[in-house]
Amino acid sequence: MTSEMRKRGTFKIFSGNANPALAKKICDILGVPLSETKMARFADGEIDAHILENVRGEDCYVVQPTCPPVNDNLMELLILMDALRRASAGRITAVIPYYGYARADRKPAPRVAITAKLVANLITEAGANRVITIDLHAAQIQGFFDIPLDHLYARPVVLEYIKGRNFENMVVVSPDVGSVERARSFAKRLDMGLVIIDKRRPRPNEAVVYNIIGDVKGKTCFIFDDLVDTAGTLTQVAYSIKEQGAGKIIAACTHGVLSRDAIEKIDKSPIEELILTDTIPVNASKSAKIKIVSVAALLAEAIKRNHMGESISELFQ
């Protein structure tokens, strides 16, 4: 911790069981110890959280993505924040690298829940004063919160990796219309062309490609999306652009959920390399195609700037 940060008072970083390795990396970068908690279970599976340090008046950060097992990790986050609030923490910031339940962000049919809003309400009611997250599935989820939210982008981390590879004749591929803005920002910074995939989703976790807007023939194609779950969309896009003459196919996703047989699909697909961040713990040894880049420095800088009262948006200008 720098002397300037100490002048602003101390702060503490806590972690549940979702991604303690990422929390430890953040602490190492900031030069602070990971604060102690005791996470136990009752016989029936209920979570019992105990803060083992004095936090009265402290600036507290809880690092906890709501990745699988989603419900367990979400409850851990809520219970940890409730414990901090009842221990008189000065300010509680939920650092949620991966915000789960985000895909239900509107009502596509009658009588369905908007879980992205429900989870936002739960986080606020549990005691969060602020949220820091990375690459929300839909940008409008920021408006579901009645507390400040800092929406970070993994783009700089992935860009640094891509620029270091010196790929030639590359185009950026948006896997669907909803990802166009994200893909366009990559294309602009890499000074490359943009290809858009016209995709339909007849049912959850199933995608059908109808049209490819743009030229991929003979080009290195870089597909970027916010998350890869069952890898149905990602691999279907890869097969489609390969049929249209694409050369090397590289994919990058911020959040590697990798459910069911996702890794097997990726290994069999034309994708030559899949770049993931460590917002979610991923066992890269399961596939030679998977490469992991860390968002720890990005989150550490956001925490430092938040603690110091400095601008976080300047990180992405």
Image: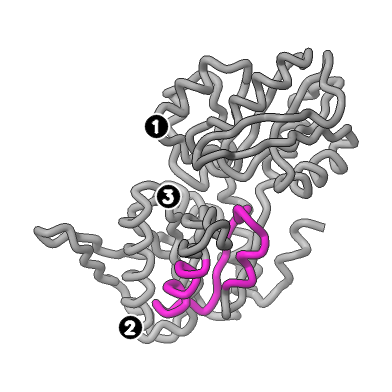
Q: Is residue 130 magenta?
A: yes
Question: Which residue corresponds to mark 3?
Answer: 67
Of labels 3 and 2, the one closer to you: 3
* Pointer 2 local density, CA inside 10 Å: few below 14, some 14–19, many at least 20: some
Q: Residue at x 13, y 62 (%)?
A: 42
SS assignment at label 2 = loop
Query: Which corner quadrant of the image does residue 313 belong to?
Result: bottom right
Question: Which residue corresponds to mark 1?
Answer: 260
Determine if residue 160 is in view: no
Task: Tell me the quadrant of the picture where the C terminus can be found.
Answer: bottom right
Looking at the rendered structure, the kind of residue marked 3 is Cys
Query: Foreground residue, 174 or 203?
Result: 203
Q: Is residue 252 above or below residue 165?
A: below
Q: Which mark is residue 281?
A: none
Task: For marks 3 and 2, give the CA distance.
Answer: 27 Å
Magenta span of residues? 117-144
SS assignment at label 1 = loop
Please name the colour scheme applied to the rendered image. one colour
Residues tagged 1 and 3 counted as in contact (Cβ below 8 A): no
Q: Is residue 6 above or below residue 226?
A: below
SS assignment at label 3 = loop
Q: Residue at x 64, y 75 (%)?
A: 308
Q: Which mark is residue 87?
A: 2
Q: Which label's residue is closer to the chain start, 3 or 2?
A: 3
Please count the marks in the image: 3
Task: For marks 2 and 1, give the CA distance.
Answer: 40 Å
Q: Position of residue 304 (x, y in %)?
A: 61, 66
Looking at the rendered structure, the kind of residue marked 1 is Arg
